[in-house]
Image (cartoon, helix red, strand yellow):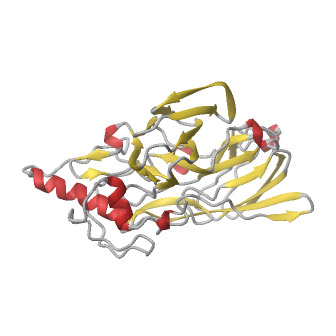
Amino acid sequence: MSAQNVSRRKFLTLAGLGLTTGLGVAACAQAPSVTPMTLPTITPGAGDGMDMPTATPGDAAADMDDLHKQGVETFVAGIGADPNFWRPPMDYTLDGAVKVFTLTCTEGPWEVTPGQSVPAMLYNGLVPGPEIRVTEGDQVRIVCVNQMTQSTSIHFHGVRAANSQDGVPYLTQDPIRPGETFTYEFTARNAGSHMYHSHHNAAEQVTKGLMGGFIIEPKDKTTDPAYDAEYTMVLNDSGIGLTINGKGFPYTQPIVAKLGQTIRVRYMNEGLLIHPMHLHGMPQTVFAKDGYNLSVPFLADTLIVGPGERWDVTVLCDEPGVWAFHCHILTHAESSHGMFGMVTALIVQE
């Protein structure tokens, strides 16, 4: 189900809101034309970068309500406007049987929210980088082109590969210096949800954007539960602030499903903090940890995702409505100015 098919009227109906609530936005199939709200500011690099936004002294309840509503208006207006939020798989070329991917590292501004740019480090111009998706048994080549002012490297987190391809400077390779290129090559051996990221000055480079999903599909897909659609959430905090897939609410995108469908969510924590991911309304069936399927899946409505961890869950969308989906460290998600940061929604359509 495309997010662009969610109209303003449908959103309000699902949310249980009347059309007199003041959500005066255009149909969501169109790109929004909205004046961005004044958002809570997260200052990267100041302490842990996670200071909670606070209301101006003397804020009245009505002022708080208006700011909260304005954030939801902006979120609704932007549904479907960012096709790269849910990262499509990266294109590759073939060299014989080898799948070849090129990742170019650059430095520049990244808009966490429109009009709020932060200094970032990017793979192919994106934060997080493009999702690399291959199949178990594939021969894979990753060409890293460093156009930054710092040296770097790439570690394929959770991926089983030869030691020489592990991407740790001075343990397995020299750093990739500015202007240099380095090529990694290995066989995709272990299926599951993995990541790739810098392993050089990593506390800065990874949290500023040098990170991405690396998914190895199993040859035998019956080893995984059945689902209708899947979504990857790359969680981050310090370098670019509190983000899901490089964006903060209200500029995140929702998951949209039809009643009765099952979705798969892959959580990947590339930040420095834990993020308990909480879905309202329906349980999550947790079936894989760090790319390995669990012998006994379990149910949870809140799942703690620690730095470096990956968790895979399915959700049976059996309750219609607009359901909040957010980190449950509340200073990562909501303040007197309304929701911000690590918040999105699951929209279940009848």
Figure check: 24 above or below 298? below
Residue at the front extreme, as displayed: 350
- Hey, which quadrant is residue 7 in on the image? bottom left
**Residue 152 percent across, percent down from the top left:** 64, 52
Taking the spot 48% from the left edge, 32% from the top edge, the residue there is 303
User: In the shown orientation, is residue 65 left or right of residue 237?
Assistant: left
- Say how many tags the image has: 0
User: In the shown orientation, is residue 175 left or right of residue 312?
Assistant: right
User: In the shown orientation, is residue 211 left or right of residue 120?
Assistant: right
Along the viewing direction, whichever of 259 and 327 lies nearer the viewer: 259
User: In the shown orientation, is residue 282 left or right of residue 72?
Assistant: right
In this orientation, does residue 172 appear? no
Taking the spot 24% from the left edge, 55% from the top edge, the residue there is 68
**Residue 100 percent across, percent down from the top left:** 80, 60
In this orientation, does residue 214 appear? yes
Figure check: 279 above or below 61? above
Residue at the top extreme, as displayed: 296
Along the viewing direction, whichever of 74 and 147 lies nearer the viewer: 74
- In the rendered image, the quadrant that contains the N terminus is bottom right
**Residue 205 percent across, percent down from the top left:** 55, 51
Taking the spot 59% from the left edge, 59% from the top edge, the residue there is 87
Figure check: 174 above or below 124? above
**Residue 189 percent across, percent down from the top left:** 82, 40
Residue at the right extreme, as displayed: 96
Figure check: 208 above or below 190? below
